[in-house]
C-alpha cells in the first residue's frame, strides 16, 4: 500500500523524460530478475544485454517524439511483436509442462522471451503516459492509471471469488491456486470498474464500447502475463522472482500482469480507434 502514493506521484507529476527514466529503472530491475529464469550462472549479463537493446530502441523511438507520425509504424511494430509473443505464451501455458521441453535448456530462447516481454512493456507504459502529452499532460496518466486499476480490480476479484466459489482449476500445471471461478470474478469486478469509469466520463456509446472491449482484452492478457511468469518461475524452481519488496516478492511479481495488459490494451485501442 505504501507504494501507491509513489506510483500516483510518478504518474501525474513527473515530466515525461523523468517518467521514462523511472520506467527504465523498473525495466532494469525486472531484467535482473528475469536473469534468474534464464540461468543462475549467467544471470549477471542478462540485465546488461537487455539494457543495451533498450538503449538501441531509444535511438529509434525518441521519447519526446514518440507520437510523431513517422514513428507510429515503429511503435506499432513493437506492439505487434508483443501481441505475437503473448499468443505464443498462451500456447506455452496451455501445453505446459510438455512445452517446457522446447525452451527450458535454451538460454537464448528464455532471454528472447524476456526481451519481448519487457521491452514492449516499457514502451507501452511510456507511450500511454505520453499520449496527447503536449495538449493535455494528464490524459496519459489517467489512461495508465485506468489500465492499472483494471488489473488491480481483476486481481482482487479473482482472489475473493476464487476463495468463495473456486472449484475448477484454471491452469493446474502452472498455478494450482487459480480457478475458473476466480477468473470470472476478476472479469466481473474489472468490468464494473470499466463501465463505471466510461459512464462517469460521459463517453458516447461507440467509444464506450471500444474502451470496454479493450479493457476485456487487457484483463484477459493480464491473467496470461501472471500465468506465464508463474510458468517460468516453476521451471526455474523459485517461488518469487526476487526479494526487493519484502513480503511481496520481486518487481516481476508486481508487474507480471501489466507486462501483458498494457501492450494489449494500447494495440487494441489504436487499431479500433483507427478503424472507427
Image (tube, grey):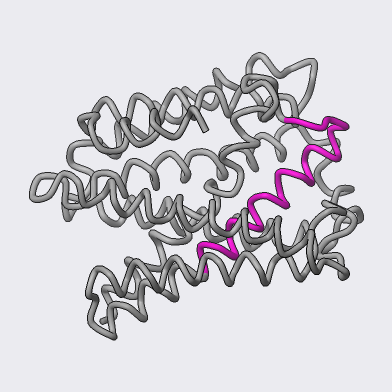
Q: Is residue 37 left or right of residue 29?
A: right
Residue 25: give x, y in percent of width and height: 44, 23
Identify the residue at the far bottom of this view. 205
Q: Position of residue 207 (x, y in %)?
A: 28, 78
Identify the residue at image location x=59%, y=37%: 254
Q: Quadrant of residue 60?
A: top left
Q: Residue at x 36, y 49 (%)?
A: 144
For residue 80, above or below residue 130? below
Residue at screen point 26% across, 55% down: 72
Dominant SS of magenta comes to helix
Question: In this image, 126 relative to 251: left or right?
Answer: left
Q: Is residue 224 left or right of residue 210?
A: right
Q: Camera-side residue: 3 or 61?
A: 3
Whether residue 273 is situated above or below residue 58 in the rendered picture: below
Pick the front one: 38 or 174 = 174
Of all residues, the one furthest to the front in this rendering is 164
Identify which residue is drawn at 70% across, 58% down.
Answer: 160
Give coordinates of residue 272: x percent, y percent.
34, 75
**Magenta stretch: includes residue 221:** yes
**Which of the two residues, 211 or 36, is positioned nearer the viewer here?**
211
Number of dots carrying numbers: 0
Which picture quadrant has residue 33?
A: top right
Q: Is residue 35 left or right of residue 99?
A: left
| Magenta region | 217-240
- Which image quarter is the C terminus in? bottom left
Residue 237 is inside the magenta segment: yes
Q: Position of residue 269 (x, y in %)?
A: 35, 67
**Residue, far left:** 135
Residue 139 vs residue 25, the one in the foreground: 139
Amino acid at each position: 500500500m505504501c507504494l501507491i502514493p509513489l506510483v500516483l506521484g510518478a504518474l501525474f507529476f513527473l515530466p515525461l523524460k523523468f517518467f521514462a527514466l523511472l520506467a527504465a529503472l523498473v525495466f532494469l530491475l525486472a531484467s535482473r530478475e528475469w536473469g534468474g529464469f534464464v540461468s543462475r550462472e549467467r544471470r549477471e549479463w542478462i540485465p546488461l544485454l537487455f539494457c543495451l537493446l533498450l538503449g538501441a530502441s531509444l535511438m529509434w523511438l525518441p521519447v519526446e517524439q514518440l507520437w510523431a507520425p513517422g514513428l507510429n509504424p515503429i511503435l506499432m511494430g513493437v506492439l505487434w511483436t508483443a501481441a505475437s509473443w503473448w499468443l505464443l505464451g498462451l500456447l506455452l501455458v496451455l501445453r505446459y509442462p510438455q512445452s517446457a521441453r522446447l525452451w527450458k535448456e535454451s538460454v537464448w530462447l528464455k532471454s528472447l522471451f524476456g526481451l519481448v516481454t519487457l521491452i514492449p512493456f516499457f514502451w507501452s507504459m511510456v507511450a500511454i503516459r505520453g499520449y496527447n502529452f503536449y495538449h493535455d499532460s494528464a490524459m496519459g496518466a489517467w489512461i495508465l492509471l485506468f489500465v492499472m486499476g483494471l488489473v488491480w480490480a481483476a486481481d482482487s476479484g479473482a482472489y475473493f471469488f476464487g476463495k468463495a466459489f473456486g472449484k475448477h482449476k484454471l491452469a493446474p500445471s502452472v498455478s494450482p491456486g487459480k480457478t475458473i471461478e476466480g477468473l470470472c470474478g476478476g472479469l466481473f469486478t474489472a468490468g464494473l470498474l470499466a463501465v463505471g469509469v466510461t459512464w462517469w466520463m460521459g463517453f458516447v456509446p461507440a467509444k464506450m464500447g471500444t474502451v470496454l472491449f479493450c479493457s476485456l482484452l487487457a484483463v484477459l492478457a493480464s491473467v496470461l502475463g501472471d500465468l506465464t511468469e508463474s510458468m517460468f518461475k516453476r521451471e526455474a524452481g523459485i517461488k518469487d522472482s526476487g526479494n526487493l519488496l519484502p513480503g511481496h516478492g520481486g518487481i516481476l511479481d508486481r508487474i507480471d500482469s501489466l507486462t501483458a495488459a498494457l501492450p494489449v490494451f494500447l494495440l487494441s485501442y489504436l487499431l479500433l480507434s483507427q478503424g472507427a
